[in-house]
Image (tube, grey):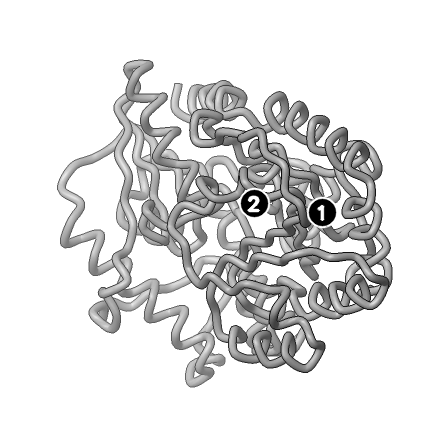
Amino acid sequence: MNILQALFFPPEQPGGVSSMVPYIQERFNKLGWPMELFSLPKRVRGKGQEEFVFETFDFKPLEGNPIVDKYMQTIRDYVWWTKLRMSKSFDLIHAHHPIAALVMKKLFPETPLVVTIHSSYERELILNGKIEEGGAEHRFLTAIYGELEAKADRLLTVSESFKQYMAPYVTNSDAIGVIPNGFNEKRFKPISHENEVVQLITVCRLVPAKGLDILLHACAELKRRGHPFVLHIIGDGPIRLELEQLAMQLDLYDDIIFYGYMLHPEEFMPFFDVFVLPSRAEAFGSVFAEAALCWLALVGTNVGGIAEQIDDGVNGLLVPPEDPVALCDALEKVVTDPSFRYNMARHAWNKAKKVYSLSRVITQLKQVYQEVAP
C-alpha cells in the first residue's frame, strides 16, 4: 500500500505532528508500506487562482473578511502547489490539516482519505484575541469540520476532549476515532543531574493562548515566597516583547531566560527539572509527553489533552486555567520537595513511554489504513 502523509507545515518544524510524522514514515517504510510526505512551503503565498467550492456550506457571503480570505487563498495555494508537484497516485492519503485534506480530496476524489485534526485554529484565534466567538470567522472555521466529515473516509483526532469539542459541528461525533500522538523514544535521552537551583522550562509559541502571562505572575508570587528558581522559555511569537516587559515589571527579568526559537528543544530539556505550561486550551499538548520522556515533572492546566496526559498528583500537577495563585502553589510543591518532584517525573516517564509510544500509533494507524483501503 502506497501512502501519502499530507501535512500543512513542513516536517522539519518542531513539535507535535510535524516532529511525529517523519518517524511514522520511517517505521512504515521498514514494514514495507511505502510512504511519502507532502507539505506546502512557507514561500508559496498568493500563487493559486483556482476556484474552490465547499459541499456542505457556502462561504461566498463571507468574502472580503480578512481571516476567511486568507484561509481561502491558502487553500488555492495548496491546490496550485499540489498540481505542480504531485505526479503520482497513492492507495491512501492521510491528511493532518483541514486544508491539506480538502485539497487532496478535490484533486484525488477516488483515493481513500483519512484525516487527523490535531488542533483548533478558531479556538487559538479566539484566545489570542484575533476573532470573536460566534462571529463570522468562527462560524466559517467551525463549518470546516462538517465539510471534513462529508469528505473524509475516516475522521480522527488526538484526544477524547477534542472529540467532544468537535461534536457540535458534525452530524455523527461517535464515528470520530481517537489516536493520541506518539513519540520516538530514541529522540529523548534523560540525563542524571542535580541543579542547585530548580530549573523550570516551558516550550511553546509565544501567543496568548499558551498562558505565559499567568506563568509569569505565578513565578513572581513564587519569588515573593522566597523560593529560588530559573525559568527557561523556549519559543518565539508575537507577544515575546510583551512578555519580556512583563518580566521586568514583575522583577523577574534576572530569573528568566528567553531563548527564542529552537529546532530541537528535546535535546535541551533533559537538563531541567520541571516542565510547566498553563495553556488556556490544548487539543493534545504534545510537549507534555515530550517533557515526560525527558524525565521532567509536569505542571499544566486542567484543559483538553493536558488533563488526559496528567493524573493529578501522580505523574504531574493540574491547576485551573487563569489562576496564577493555584499555579504558584503547584510550583511551590515541586520546587521545595525534590523527592516528590522525582517521583512525579518517574511516573510521567513511565506513562509516556507506555501510552504515547510510536509503536502504539503505528499499530493503530495500520488498522485504520487496512479498514479504509483494504
The answer to whether 41 appears left or right of 342 in the picture is: left
Q: Which mark is residue 164?
A: 1
Judge whether 20 appears above or below 324 on screen: above
Judge whether 155 appears above or below 67 on screen: above
**Residue located farthest toward the bottom when viewing the structure as drawn:** 64
Under circle 2, the secondary element is helix
Question: Closer to the camera, 159 or 348?
Answer: 348
On-image quarter of the C terminus: top left
**Quarter of the figure with residue 120:** bottom right
Residue at left offset 55%, top offset 59%: 233
Name the residue carrying label 2: 287
Judge whether 188 appears above or below 264 on screen: above
How far apart are labels 1 and 2 at the CA level? 22 Å
Work out whether residue 290 can be spotted: yes
The answer to whether 256 appears left or right of 214 in the picture is: left
Residue 305 position in % (x across, y down): 67, 44
Name which residue type carries label 1: Gln
Question: Closer to the camera, 20 or 47?
Answer: 20
Residue at left offset 78%, top offset 65%: 223
Work out whether residue 178 can be spotted: no
**Quarter of the figure with residue 190:** top right
Residue at left offset 39%, top offset 36%: 21
Name which residue type carries label 2: Val
Residue 110 position in % (x across, y down): 31, 37
Residue 6 position in % (x across, y down): 34, 43
Q: Which mark is residue 200?
A: none
Question: Closer to the camera, 11 or 329?
Answer: 329
Residue 135 position in % (x across, y down): 63, 78
Q: Earlier in the sequence, mark 1 or mark 2?
A: 1
